[in-house]
Image: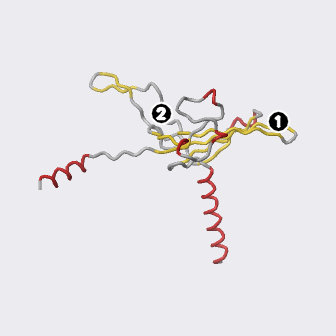
Amino acid sequence: MDLAASLLTFTMFWKLSYSLQCYTCCPDPGRSKSTEPCPCTQFDYSDKHVVQCEQSTMCFKRITTLEFGDGLTSKSISRGCAPQTSKGEQRKTNGKWHPVTDIYEAYEESCSEDPSNDERTTKTTHCYCRGDRCNGAQKILRNVLAVAAVAVILCCLS
């Protein structure tokens, strides 16, 4: 009986923790953090490109395209955890200031072009998503295929 009560008490106070997993890579190895596998040209959807996002609830993918003319373009991609915290925040508790890390829901789950694209020669698209490893193209492709399959089924039924 004591063992059962101990296990029940332990499970009641056991904190389940979950950390979002995102793919990570950067376009320029010289600008990367030491924890980021680089560059995205070597990105292969393997576990070596996965990070735990403890301070984020979303992943991001940024695609920057530069058009040179004559049909020549250059594209760079970066992936990672969406930045959702502010550095340097503090809260006063019991008369003392303590650093805090609040996660802000600053993004919508979607892709959008940078509003300053009209003023620049580079075009940037920012994508934000929820769910483990959602910032890989394979998941986006699966979603497109699922929508297409539903459309085909609806067409066949009508």
In the image, is residue 106 above or below residue 158? Answer: above
* Image coordinates for residue 134, horizontal then vertical, percent: 55, 49
Image quadrant containing the C terminus:
bottom right
What residue is drawn where x is 61% and y is 46%? Answer: 44
Sequence-earlier tag: 1 or 2: 1
What residue is drawn where x is 82% and y is 35%? Answer: 68
* Image coordinates for residue 154, horizontal then vertical, percent: 63, 72
Return the residue at label 1.
68
What residue is drawn where x is 25% and y is 50%? Answer: 11
In the image, is residue 40 above or below residue 109? Answer: above
> Considering the numbered disc 2 on the image, is that residue within a helix, a strand or a loop?
loop
Q: Residue most toward the right?
A: 70
In the image, is residue 152 above or below residue 125? Answer: below
* Image coordinates for residue 102, horizontal then vertical, percent: 42, 35
Return the residue at label 2.
85
**Looking at the rendering, which quadrant does residue 115 occupy?**
top right
Sort mark 1 into few (<14), some (14-19) or many (20+) by Cα contacts within 10 Å.
few
- Look at the numbered discs 1 and 2 and tell me whether their residues touch, using CB distance below 8 Å: no
Q: Which residue occupies the foreground of this view, 42 or 135?
A: 42
